[in-house]
Amino acid sequence: MGVEGLKIADAGLAATHTLWALSLLLDGQRYVLKPVVPPLFAIAHLLITLLLLTGHKTHGHLLATPLLTYYWFFVKPFEPIAEPQTVGILGVTLALLVKESGKTRAGLWRPILRLGVAYPLVEWGLDAFRNPVHFKAYLSVNTITSRIIPAWGLDYAVFTLGVYELVLAGLIVSGVLEKTPAAIAASTFLAFIAVAGYPLAFPQNIALAAAATLHPSPPLEKHRCVNHGYIHRLQIFWGWSLGPACTCTVVFRRWVTGFTSRM
């Protein structure tokens, strides 16, 4: 993975932070509960963008990490800073932070990156099975999908979408057929932008699509890794255990959100 790949990932993150800032400034009424002071958070996003674009990437990722963690637990879903992409972007940010630190084993950042890219797909896939009524209702009124999917095919469409997202997430994290799932994931995130638009997919899917381009591992780096076989088996284990793990994470996050809302 070359310098150009990192530039693409950082550019994707910078674009997302910039557009989030504009959303906070120009569409503040959409944020019903939190962030409490949208302009303050907009300044934080613009500062992150400035750090990323001026070469202070480590500082930018360090500033973004607590901000994204706050969004994960305390910002109402389906606002412009939307779940679950925020969790995925947090994973991507942590992966790049680990890579830039240079104090960890080479290649450790890759599983973290894969988890970040795959997480939104897992939560979407699980939601398609947990709450198919919501998905069918959305597909039936969406400008694009309502013209493509007939009413009788909504059940099949939701089921297929759920399976597609979960299988793709498993392939991404496991590292099986590396380049193909990465390209499909990037295309999927961009397609969701075209279909769902703002605020459900835009601008957060920009960062995820850019991060997906970092997924493939160059052959030379594989050969330099002495324990590549062990790491590869570990990635496969992570890939196919990702669904239960993310389910627990989603349940815990929703419990925390419900608990704090009653305070």
Image (cartoon, rainbow, N blue to C red):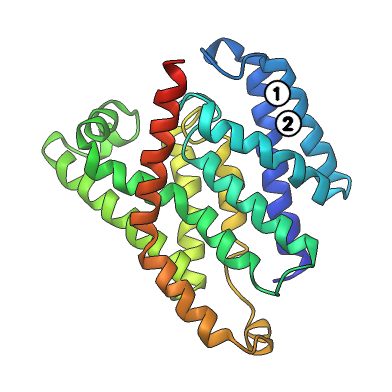
- The residue lying toward the viewer, choosing from 232 and 73, is 73
Within 10 Å of disc 1 (Cα), the crowding (few <14, some 14-19, many 20+) is: some
Residue drawn at the location 52% of the way across and 84% of the way down: 230
Contact (CB < 8 A) between labels 1 and 2? yes
Residue 203 appears at what percent x and percent y? 58, 35
Determine if residue 232 is in view.
yes
Label 1 secondary element: helix
Tell me the tag on residue 41.
Answer: 1
Residue 72 appears at what percent x and percent y? 53, 35
Three-letter amino acid code of the residue under disc 2: His
- The residue lying toward the viewer, choosing from 139 and 233, is 233
Within 10 Å of disc 2 (Cα), the crowding (few <14, some 14-19, many 20+) is: many
- The residue lying toward the viewer, choosing from 107 and 244, is 244
How many tags in the picture?
2
Determine if residue 175 is in view.
no
Q: CA distance from mark 1 to mark 2?
A: 6 Å
Residue drawn at the location 32% of the way across and 48% of the way down: 125
Residue wearing tag 2: 45
Label 2 secondary element: helix
Three-letter amino acid code of the residue under disc 1: Phe
Examine the image and state in which quarter residue 143 appears: top left
Q: Tell which residue pokes out farthest to the left in this image.
A: 152
Examine the image and state in which quarter residue 109 appears: bottom right
Residue 75 appears at what percent x and percent y? 53, 25
Image quarter hosting the N terminus: bottom right
- The residue lying toward the viewer, choosing from 146 and 37, is 37
Residue drawn at the location 73% of the way across and 63% of the way down: 99
Residue 3 appears at what percent x and percent y? 78, 65
Image vertical order of residue 94 relative to residue 140, above or below = below
